[in-house]
Image (cartoon, rainbow, N blue to C red):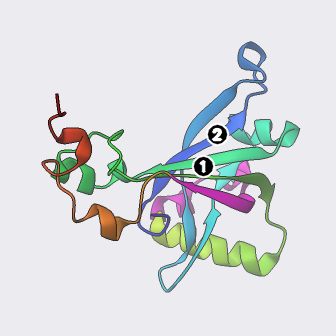
Amino acid sequence: MVKTMTYGVLSSISTMEKTAGKPFGNPYSYADGTATNSTGILYFYVSDLDQSMKDFEANNAASFTLTEAELSYCMDQGYDPEDPPCARCVLSGDFEKLTDEDEIAFAKEGLFAKHPKMRTWPESHDFCTPHPKAPNSHPQTPPRRFLRRRTPDTHPSHLPRKP
């Protein structure tokens, strides 16, 4: 999922006055390396002016949610985004800015290839390339090979219940 998708929802603990201490989700584009070297490590191109980055300064605990509903598979199968066969994945970890120049260059290469418009974003906004450190993965469905054999007609949630 990480290699195929282009965006997800990055969640922080809000520091905004009216929502302080509450979860705050924000959609973000990301890359996990280059086209020839997909690492599974999430990289973001973000500004310190963004509210989520302000939140991470106070508490760097983060989660990033992906859903297969972004792709056409779920819709093509007639699945609702919450149907179990429509895969979801939540990655959680501590959000940190990269400091290694080689890794920053690698992250930017992947981000700019996957999201070419990012290259034109203003330098005055101090964009950086943070990522979740040591993320934990929380897949929400069985492996795809199992799911492909099921259709809306054969998935247990769609079968008539026995009286």
Mark drawn on residue 64: 1
Quadrant into which the C terminus falls: top left
Q: Secondary structure at mark 1?
A: strand
Asked if the residue at tag 1 contacts the one at tag 2, i.e. Cβ–Cβ closer than 8 Å, the answer is yes
Q: Residues within 10 Å of mark 1 (few under 14, many from 20)?
A: many
Q: Nearer the viewer, residue 15 or 146?
A: 146
Name the amino acid type tagged 1.
Phe
| Residue 30 image point, x, y percent | 55, 59
Image disc number at residue 11: 2
* Residue nearer the viewer, 158 or 38: 158
Residue 78: x percent and y percent?
A: 17, 45
Tell me the SS state at disc 2. strand
Name the residue at 21% across, 48% down.
75
Dot 2 or dot 1, earlier in sequence: 2
Q: Position of residue 64 (x, y in %)?
A: 60, 49
- Residue 131 magenta: yes
Residue farthest to the top, as pictured? 18
The vertical placement of 162 against 103, above or below, is above
Where residue 28 appears, x then y in whole percent? 55, 48
Mark seen at residue 8: none
- Residue drawn where x is 74% and y is 42% of the image: 53
Q: Which residues are magenta?
A: 116-139
